[in-house]
Amino acid sequence: MDGKTGFAERSGKLVISPQWDQAFDFTEGLALVCIGECDGDHQMGYRVTKAFDREPVEQTFKYGYVDESGRLVINPTFEEAEPFHEGLAAVCSGKGCYYSYPKKEGAEAKWGYIDKSGKAVIPPQFDSVGEFHEGLAWIIVGGRYGYIDKVGKFVINPQYDWAVNFEDGVAAVAVKTQADKDTLPTYKRGYIDREGKYIWQPSN
């Protein structure tokens, strides 16, 4: 309403009045909200001009979290953030926390995790991260994927060129192969267990 977002019950009754510039679904009792210029151009860090050039756009928004009464329980202090999953939420701090990856040259953005009080459980230190699934989350360090536990300890060291969340104790990963310098890279995919052991060796 009037450019602001709020929340309503299924009956249509307004529960939290529209006051946020952007808001997302509730997960585990909290909803991610954005304050400021939360449009796509500002989130990406650039806009496309009429000449199809990219014009830099400074980030002018912050993310925080509200409870189901609409109370702001975690102040908007993050340049990027994700919904809570298994009690933790991924948050980003520093310049360059846009959706694009790899990060821009000179970017200082690092990802970590907070709990529902807003406390940094795992300090910002990763280039990119995923949600926790089955107690583990994929992270990216130096362009390589690995997995950490809920205290930030590496369970599987960064060594893959692609990886996804664990499901039923198994995760798909991929490693890059390249025949020669003039050939585009290809990927072999396999499956690992929670210790990083292959249960299906990478293959085409």
Image (cartoon, grey):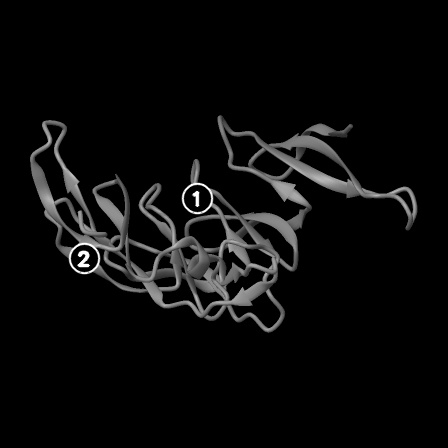
Query: Residue 135 occupies which quadrant of the picture?
Result: top left
Query: Residue 174 occupies which quadrant of the picture?
Result: top right
Q: Which residue is drawn at 25% across and 53% down?
A: 116
- Is 82 above or below relative to 164? below
> What residue is shown with label 2?
73
Hey, what amino acid is under mark 1?
Answer: Glu
Q: Nearer the viewer, residue 194 or 18?
A: 18
Q: Which residue is drawn at 44% across and 70% down?
A: 58
Q: Residue at x 68, y 46 (%)?
A: 161
> What residue is shown with label 1?
131
Q: Position of residue 28 (x, y in %)?
A: 25, 40
Q: In this view, does 118 lie to the left or right of 174?
A: left
Query: Residue 123 occupies which quadrant of the picture?
Result: bottom left
Hey, what amino acid is under mark 2?
Answer: Val
Label total for image:
2
Q: What element carries label 2?
A: strand
Q: Residue at x 44, y 37 (%)?
A: 133
Q: Position of residue 145 (x, y in %)?
A: 62, 48
Q: Which mark is first along the chain, 1 or 2? A: 2
The quadrant the C terminus occupies is: top right
- Is 135 above or below relative to 88? above
Q: Is residue 163 left or right of residue 44?
A: right
Q: Are marks 2 and 1 in contact (CB under 8 Å)?
A: no
Q: Which of 109 and 58 is in front in this view?
A: 58
Residue, far bottom: 106
Residue 8 at least partly seen = yes
